[in-house]
């Protein structure tokens, strides 16, 4: 939420602070900083925190080599992170935007690489409404080149004191230059035979009611009503024969969801499992052109390594849509893989089809108290039928980045990913692999 503008403030003040750390800086501050760096490098650790013989083994060296290389490259950023935490700069900046209790406020919003391509805006929120931990949020984003998105959400963790939870979300989209690549997993990239453009207006609202079942298991039932109007865009227009082009659609979606979540934190997990299974049924209410079902299955495993301060995340995701009664699925409802949907080295809208299969592996390690580094690799493909799945058609991307996060909140992630088709940069104020309901923003 408070993503890029706060981050830019931090960088500018940090650079200024670095320029004034010479004679003007006290001896005690210098000695504290030196001690901090020594301890972080493992040269001045207490006996019980020093690496064991096992951690000094060849295996540890091999596994840690990419991390050490990335640490060396990003050392200046780490030094700035140390500085802004020493002077408590983040809290000073947040004083401008948040209330004294840090439960609410109005903050700038910035995204680069989001579903709208990027944009700036504002978010107003409160995380402890009526002192009952109810959360409310409203945000507006002006995207590039002329896209708009507005969101409103409300969460009640205990409806009328009951074990039931309630989530309500309202979304409005105005996309003037969306991207669609016909051809599924074999869609060419070149503009002459690949990327096409469309315009999409959408209003979507969903309600989810859930409750714990037993232990870490929970269940929920959701319903969504949405209106979408899609048409060919400027430039190379999307083909008129693609389902959903030149038509408006009012539809409802319902379905159950079963979740197992044993992670130790939502924003900065270091151990546990996340398993989710969802079934959906969607039907058009103002015609008989569209009707389909969908299901998703997701498994995440977080493994703490080397005293628990490194985390290996392994993830598998499968999604599939099937049309019913010889009806169609609108193109903007298809499952997709791109930089916003788990395959981070590919541009927005690059791969879409009825099915999507994705694997992710991510290595997370501490840079500083509220800064986390990551190295990752993604492999996935979209498909029409399961028989279309082939090992040789997996698309690969790999990259690295930073996550600015605490156990209770998430500020920003900055990631760079590369693939056979080039490099992608993401600056986003949300957690990786977080699925959002809603047509154009749906998927991962």
Image: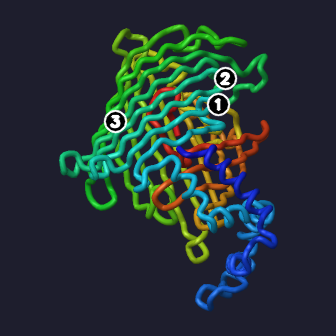
Taking the image as shown, residue 223 lies to the left or right of residue 110, namely left
Callout 3: helix, strand or loop?
strand
| Residue of label 1 | 117
| Residue of label 2 | 145
Position of residue 229 measured from the top left corner of the image (x, y, whole percent): 49, 13
Callout 1: helix, strand or loop?
loop
Q: Is residue 433 above or below residue 244?
A: below
Callout 2: helix, strand or loop?
loop
Q: Residue at x 40, y 61 (%)?
A: 262
Q: Residue at x 79, y 38 (%)?
A: 422
Would residue 242 be visible to someone looking at this image? yes
Query: What numbered label is drawn on residue 168?
Result: 3
Q: Nearer the viewer, residue 236 or 300?
A: 236
Callout 2: 10 Å neighbours few (<14), some, many (20+)?
few
Q: CA distance from mark 3 to mark 1?
A: 25 Å
Q: CA distance from mark 2 to mark 3?
A: 29 Å
Position of residue 442 measured from the top left corner of the image (x, y, whole percent): 50, 33
Callout 1: 10 Å neighbours few (<14), some, many (20+)?
many
Name the image quarter holding residue 112: top right
């Amino acid at each position: 939420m408070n993503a890029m503008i706060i981050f830019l403030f931090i960088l500018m003040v940090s650079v200024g602070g670095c320029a004034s750390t010479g004679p003007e800086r006290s001896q005690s501050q210098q000695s504290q900083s030196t001690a901090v760096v020594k301890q972080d490098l493992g040269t001045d650790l207490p006996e019980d925190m020093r690496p064991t013989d096992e951690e000094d083994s060849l295996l540890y060296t091999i596994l840690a080599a990419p991390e050490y290389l990335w640490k060396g490259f990003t050392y200046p950023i780490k030094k700035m992170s140390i500085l802004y935490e020493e002077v408590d700069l983040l809290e000073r900046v947040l004083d401008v935007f948040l209330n004294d209790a840090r439960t609410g406020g109005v903050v700038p919003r910035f995204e680069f690489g989001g579903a709208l391509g990027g944009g700036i805006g504002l978010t107003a929120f409160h995380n402890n409404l009526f002192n009952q931990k109810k959360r409310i949020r409203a945000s507006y984003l002006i995207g590039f080149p002329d896209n708009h998105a507005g969101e409103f959400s409300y969460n009640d963790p205990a409806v009328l004191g009951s074990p039931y939870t309630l989530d309500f979300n309202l979304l409005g989209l105005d996309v003037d230059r969306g991207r669609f690549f016909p051809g599924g997993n074999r869609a060419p990239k070149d503009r002459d035979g690949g990327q096409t453009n469309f315009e999409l207006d959408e209003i979507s609202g969903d309600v989810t009611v859930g409750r714990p079942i037993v232990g870490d298991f929970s269940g929920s039932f959701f319903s969504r009503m949405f209106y979408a109007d899609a048409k060919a865009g400027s430039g190379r227009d999307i083909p008129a024969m693609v389902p959903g082009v030149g038509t408006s659609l009012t539809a409802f979606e319902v379905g159950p969801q079963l979740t197992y979540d044993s992670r130790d934190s939502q924003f900065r997990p270091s151990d546990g499992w996340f398993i989710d299974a969802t079934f959906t049924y969607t039907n058009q209410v103002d015609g008989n052109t569209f009707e389909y079902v969908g299901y998703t299955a997701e498994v995440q495993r977080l493994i703490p390594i080397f005293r628990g301060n490194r985390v290996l995340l392994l993830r598998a995701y499968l999604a599939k849509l099937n049309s019913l009664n010889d009806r169609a699925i609108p193109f903007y409802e298809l499952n997709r893989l791109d930089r916003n949907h788990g395959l981070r080295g590919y541009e927005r809208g690059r791969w879409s089809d009825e099915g999507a299969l994705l694997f992710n592996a991510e290595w997370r390690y501490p840079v500083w108290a509220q800064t986390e580094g990551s190295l990752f690799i993604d492999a996935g493909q979209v498909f029409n039928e399961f028989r279309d799945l082939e090992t040789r058609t997996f698309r690969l991307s790999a990259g690295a980045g930073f996550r600015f996060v605490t156990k209770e909140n998430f500020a920003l992630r900055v990631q760079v990913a590369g693939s056979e088709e080039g490099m992608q940069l993401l600056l986003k104020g949300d957690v990786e692999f977080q699925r959002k309901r809603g047509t154009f923003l749906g998927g991962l």
